[in-house]
Image (cartoon, rainbow, N blue to C red):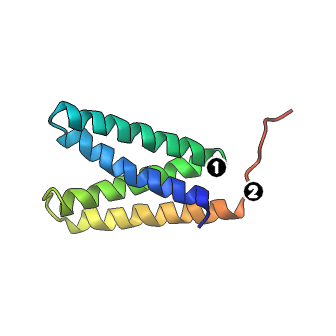
Amino acid sequence: MTRHWLLVFLAGVLEVGWVSGLKYAQNTLEWIATGIIITLSFIILILATKHLPVGTVYAVFAGLGTAGTVIVEMVVFGEPFKLMKVLLIIMLLAGVVGLKLLSDRAPVEKGGSQ
């Protein structure tokens, strides 16, 4: 995995943190921390898109964030386990992995059309 894909993964992990923060933050310090995590997540995502296909990066970021948030909700915050939800998350992750594998094969074009 390249350094840039590691950045996308890190941004996705941070997304899980800030999405949870949006729901569970209760005081000023928690809201400030949530804002900082949002900012860091998007700065890291922007750095990754400088070197990777934007559409694929965003799909991977959103997919990892969605799957991670659902898992954290069930494991940490007591959301009820639902088999169908887990199966759908697995399908989502399969699509994200497929997009990533396809993007590894296609070269990224730089510059605009002339």
Residue 17 percent location from the top left of the image = 31, 49
- Name which of mark 1 and mark 2 comes first in the sequence: 1
Q: Is residue 81 visible?
A: yes
93 with respect to 53 (left or right): left
Q: Amino acid at mark 1?
A: Pro
- Around disc 2, counting alpha carbons within 10 Å, would you say few (fewer than 14), some (14 to 19), or many (20 or more)? few
Residue labelled with disc 2: 107
Question: Which residue is farthest front?
Answer: 29
Name the secondary structure under disc 1: loop
82 with respect to 33 (left or right): left
Determine the CA span between mark 1 and mark 2.
9 Å
- Around disc 1, counting alpha carbons within 10 Å, would you say few (fewer than 14), some (14 to 19), or many (20 or more)? some
Q: Tell me what residue is drawn at x 49 percent, y 60 percent.
A: 96
Q: Amino acid at mark 2?
A: Pro
Residue 82 percent location from the top left of the image = 19, 65
Q: Which mark is residue 70?
A: none
Name the secondary structure under disc 2: loop
Q: Tell me what residue is drawn at x 64 percent, y 51 percent.
A: 52
Q: Nearer the viewer, residue 45 or 101?
A: 45
Residue 68 percent location from the top left of the image = 33, 58
The quarter in which the N terminus is drawn is bottom right
The quarter in which the C terminus is drawn is top right
Residue labelled with disc 1: 53
